[in-house]
Amino acid sequence: MTNDVFICYTPEDEGVAEHIKNLFENNSIKCWFKKRDYDSEKDSVKTISNAIRDSKCMVLVCSNDAVKSMFVTTEVDIAFSSNVEIIIFNIDDSKLEGKLQFYLKDKPAIEAFPNTDEYYDVLLEDTQKLLNKTAEMSDKKNDVYLCYNDEDEKIAEAVCHVLEENEIKCWFKKRDYTVNDTVRRITESIKNSKCVVLISSKDSVKSKYVETETDLALSESIPILSFRIDDSFKPQHLSDVHWLDAYPNPENYFKNLVVDAGNLVDKKIDNPKITSNYESIEKREETPEVKPDTKPAKSTSGNSNQNYRISKNFKIIIIALVVIFVLAIGAYIVSTHFFDIVGDDYMIVKDNEGTHLDKKAPKNTLEMTTTKQRLNSTHCKIWAKLYTEPDNFDDYTINAKYYDESGNVIGESTNKMNNVSEDDDGKLIIIDYRSDKRILEVEFDILDENGNQVFHQRNSKN
């Protein structure tokens, strides 16, 4: 990383930020300071994004001006999504809201008001501690990062044992991750490993955590050895990694695992040492279907069957009443002055090579689910859930057109994706448009930073 600290602030708080910069750099803490390090005539916004990602931590000068600043929110967003640690330096009684409240709710904060000057030394001490912890994590190099789903913890523990008894050092989440650690601990552990050993199973291929960890390893060009312990399918994005099929009895393949892992971490091991100082792993088999006993149970009372039927019928009645109540509520909502344009809609937009992971760049896919779209006669609001991984997502643009009954355009709007807002329930509002004319249809496109269309939809009243 290029910088120790990225200082995030608004122009109104520049004096405080500059004081922090001088204090830090007088104590050998390298800072990225916008006033000094950013040239608006030569540099692009991407310079700021890269500076945040290339910093070990961010110090946010938090104030009433900062919580209202779109630029501060965007910078905090980048730090949060990049697993950059954040320290909050509150210089007044400002309250976090919306996205900032979500990003910063668990971050350490220093209440530096009303006498801010008294708290600069506290900020310096806390920042030094955080940087020292980050340095310690970086110094702890591992040969292998063990990637597994919780259901496979038992076999992961055995794998850790056989690798380490052959002097292949492992990072094992059950042992090495504590309740005081953050997600950054896992990220740094992957980056500081020579290879990843994946315990591949029917549970792991469905795990988002396993997918995130393997994606990170691929993006960092860290080799992956997949130890396949059942006949689960091979995920497409892992088709090119090293696979070792080890089923139905994984223990029989431990020697192969040690040899292959040794080659990946530059430790040639011809005769692996395999002891049984770990709990034996049962052979993984399909669970046989349990057929119900067809013989009726012997009654202990002449009224037991009748009581059972009454109880069963009562449950059916309760369930029916609940269903009717839910349907009635739904009908009421539909009958209000809002009307649905389109129900739940789902689209995955892929890049020109399909859905895949390019080892030279992050995954480049955009998924969008429109959860509800509503209009009254002159107001259009569209909520959506957006999932994306490109670094340049903030540069995506939403272009929208609004039509009357005759199909004439009565309005247009353009909005940067990093300017979208949230409602009180945390839903993302990508379009919120009012007009003095009746709106019948809405059409919108999402364009990437090069102007290429990645999403299109046109909706009208049924």
Image: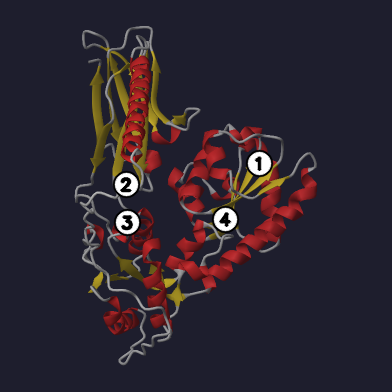
- Rendered residue at 80%/48% (across/down): 118
Up the image or down, 305 lies above or below 183; here it is above
Q: Is residue 389 left or right of residue 346?
A: right
Mark earlier in primary sequence (4, 2) = 4
Can you give x and y, in whole percent of width and height, for residue 65 in the image? 63, 33
Q: Does residue 44 appear in the picture of this structure?
A: no
Which residue position holds label 4?
A: 57
Can you give x and y, in whole percent of width and height, for residue 16 in the image? 70, 44
Which residue position holds label 1?
A: 14
Secondary structure of the residue carrying tag 1 is: helix
Can you give x and y, in whole percent of width and height, for residue 44 in the image? 44, 44
Mark earlier in primary sequence (2, 1) = 1
Which amino acid type corresponds to the residue marked 1 in the rendered image?
Answer: Glu
- Rendered residue at 54%/57% (across/down): 182
Secondary structure of the residue carrying tag 4 is: strand
Which residue position holds label 2?
A: 299
Dot 4, crowdedness within 10 Å: few (<14), some or many (≥20)?
A: many
Which amino acid type corresponds to the residue marked 3 in the rendered image?
Answer: Ala
Marks 2 and 3: which is nearer the front? Answer: 2
- Rendered residue at 56%/60% (across/down): 181
Q: Is residue 185 left or right of residue 337?
A: right
